[in-house]
Image (tube, rainbow, N blue to C red):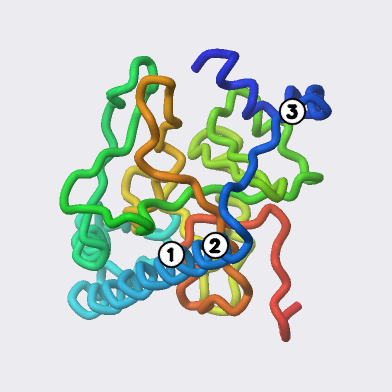
Amino acid sequence: MSWKSYRHRLVPWLLANWKSRSVRRLKQSAEERSHIASDIVNGVEGVCSVLSATEHTARGTCSSCCAAGCRLRLTGRSKYGGGCSLLQHSGPAVRAYCGFSLSVRNSSLPNAGLGVFLAEGNIRKGQLVALYPGTVYQSFQPIFFQSLGNPFILRCVDGLLVDGNRSRLSSLVFRSCWHRDRLGDHFLGESSWLTKYSINPLSIGQIVNNQTHDVPANVSYEEANLLIGFPIEYRCYIPNLNYQPLVYAGHD
């Protein structure tokens, strides 16, 4: 990645050029953005419900394997290997629900590294395609060292930063947050996206490349908030965690 492209992801450069920055304008009206955000949340909840049902089925058919659920969520595979029933069935289940599946391979863009491709099926206009995983930072929270040499930091319209790097310090920070954030028996995030054995096959949004002058984008980037009312039992399939922990009503 060239410096001209990377500098917009480097937090120190952003701070030094804050006054002369270009601001991304939203073309949709507030009402249109609200509808889009609602569609995204509904899509995420639908995928999570499919993964939840698949996990319950996997536990019934592979109890010895899926008893190692904590290890599976952390490493992307159980101690019994990549043949875990949940890993085997989550991809086909999500493909059946969404009507498509994705694959990651070398990008068709010059010097762009990896890219995300449609492997099977068709994607409808306005449909949820992928999720951008990673640790979510407020604009005032420390991310300097994580940003060094990191092309996967996404700056949102509201100033939030999402670190989608699955290696080095970024990976350690996310794993630390994953171990920290549990509500009873419920995991509050999904960490197997850090490996090649991801439970949620849509957790590859950070690999989607930006458009170029010659190749226009065929997907659009949209933002949505999963509010506290989002089903707690589905959060274990969401590949995002806050750098600062959330406080839920009725809990310390």
Q: Earlier in the sequence, mark 3 or mark 1?
A: 3
Disc 3 residue type (three-letter): Arg
* SS category of the residue bearing label 3: loop
Circle 2 residues within 10 Å: few <14, some 14–19, many ≥20: few
User: Which mark's residue is nearer the viewer, 1 or 2?
Assistant: 2
Instruction: Choose the circle earlier in sequence order: 2 or 3.
Output: 3
Q: CA distance from mark 3 to mark 1?
A: 35 Å
Residue on which disc 3 sits: 21
The disc label shown at residue 32, or none: 2
**214 is higher (above) or lower (below) than 134:** above
Q: CA distance from mark 1 to mark 2?
A: 27 Å
Amino acid carrying label 1: it is Tyr
Percent of width and height locating residue 74: 45, 55
Image height of 109 relative to 220, above or below = above
Q: Nearer the viewer, mark 2 or mark 3?
A: 2
Which residue is denoted by mark 1 in the rendering?
A: 237
Question: Which of the two discs, 3 and 1, sits closer to the camera?
Answer: 3
Q: Position of residue 223 (x, y in %)?
A: 56, 54
Q: Position of residue 5 (x, y in %)?
A: 56, 20
